[in-house]
Amino acid sequence: MSHNSTGVFDAGDRDNIDVAKIACRKQAVLQRAKLANASPDAGIMLAGHAAGLTGRYGCGVYAGYMPIHSELSPLELLENLVGLGCDLALPITPRAGQPLGFHRWEIGGLLDDGPYGTKQPPAGNDKCTPDVILAPLLAFDAGGWRLGYGGGFYDRTVAGLRAFGQRVTLIGIAYEGQKVDKIPVGPFDMPLDAVLSPAGMFELEGSRKL
């Protein structure tokens, strides 16, 4: 499913990527909050695409996240994925500069407090390597580039897994209105393989086109 751009900014010509990203984040935070307030049923609509995900990517281990702030919740989607035979994992956020660790989790399972106001599975839960990572984001563009919070956790994690030969798919979870004209891209950024919104999959340019 293709969608028209609703670009909030285009910072692609700025020299300083870090400064450009900071400016983009400020606008994207406000935009996402507006979309969240206007779309109370977005999580339920998102969950309706579970069968499409498993049809494309199989019924392996799907790593989700516990939503914070105005992030689009994947929890109903995760519940539907379990019903289709998938296993679940959630990330444990490490100290700065380290990749995420993923631990098994079940719907309604225990959660511990994590950094940055996050919730995460107990460290005693079994570790695992997900087949599909569902990642929150502030904005994305047609090239599949993702704007996150600046910690680099998802980029570092995916790069590390693939460097060791692990096949992992990175899917951004977003409202349609989070699509922008162009994301400023740094040398360590990892592109998304797909973006799933309540309306369905976005078409991405190049090798990640769906």
Image (cartoon, rainbow, N blue to C red):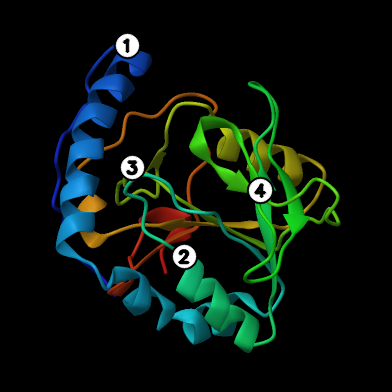
In the rendered structure, which disc, 2 or 4, sits on the residue that comes first in sequence? Answer: 2
| Residue type at numbered disc 3 | Leu
Q: Which residue is mark 4?
A: 91
- The picture quadrant where one finds residue 168 is bottom right
Q: For residue 180, say whether it is visible.
A: no
Task: Report how far apart the C-alphas of labels 3 and 1 lie in the structure.
Answer: 19 Å
Task: Report how far apart the C-alphas of labels 3 and 2 lie in the structure.
Answer: 15 Å
Query: Which numbered disc, 1 or 2, marks the residue closer to the eye?
Result: 2
Residue in the picture at 35% in, 44% down: 69
Residue in the picture at 51% in, 31% down: 116
| Residue type at numbered disc 4 | Pro
Q: Which residue is mark 2?
A: 74
Q: Which residue is mark 3?
A: 138
Q: Which residue is mark 1?
A: 16
Label 1's element?
loop
Label 3's element?
loop
Q: Is residue 140 left or right of residue 154?
A: left
| Residue type at numbered disc 2 | Pro
In the rendered structure, which disc, 4 or 3, sits on the residue that comes first in sequence? Answer: 4
